[in-house]
């Protein structure tokens, strides 16, 4: 199972959307500052997640969530 997730920075106005097979490990890496993309915005809290059977479906949903309109909707959560 591949998980698509959105995490929100606790210290900045920043939302990161991504996909991973191991959500707990990825969130730990993000919070520990071990991911280049999210390092400046740590720490994070998980705000949304959903599971997909395969990588192709997960990638489609990830792209959808990264769109401007949907990201604004995530900010309202």
Image (cartoon, rainbow, N blue to C red):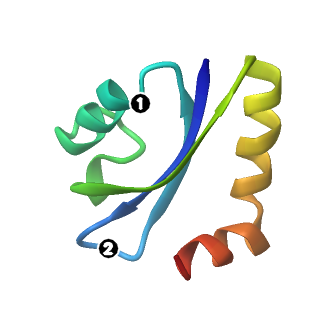
Give the secondary structure at mark 1: helix
Would residue 34 appear left or right of 72 to someone viewing this image?
Answer: left
**Is residue 66 found left or right of 35 in the rendered image?**
right
* Label 1 CA crowd tier, 10 Å (few <14, some 14–19, many 20+): some
* Disc number for residue 23: 1
Reply above or below: 23 against 62.
above
Up the image or down, 52 lies above or below 12; here it is above
Which quadrant holds residue 29? Answer: top left
Q: Which residue is at a point 30% across and 25% down the rendered structure image?
A: 25
Q: Nearer the viewer, mark 1 or mark 2?
A: 1
Residue 73: x %, y % from top left: 66, 76
Q: Which numbered circle lies on residue 15?
A: none
Residue for point 73% across, 31% down: 58
Q: Using the rendered view, name the quadrant where residue 27 is placed.
A: top left
Looking at marks 1 and 2 on the same chain, the residue that comes earlier in the sequence is marked by 2
Separation of residues labelled 1 and 2 (CA atoms)? 21 Å
User: According to the image, label 2 marks what residue?
Assistant: 12
């Amino acid at each position: 199972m591949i998980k698509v997730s959105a995490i929100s920075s606790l210290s900045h106005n920043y939302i990161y959307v991504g996909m991973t097979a191991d959500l707990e490990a990825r969130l730990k890496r993000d919070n520990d500052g071990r991911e280049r993309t999210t390092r400046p915005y740590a720490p994070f809290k998980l705000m949304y997640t959903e599971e997909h059977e395969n990588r192709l479906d997960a990638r489609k949903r990830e792209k959808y969530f990264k769109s401007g309109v949907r990201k604004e909707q995530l900010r309202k959560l």
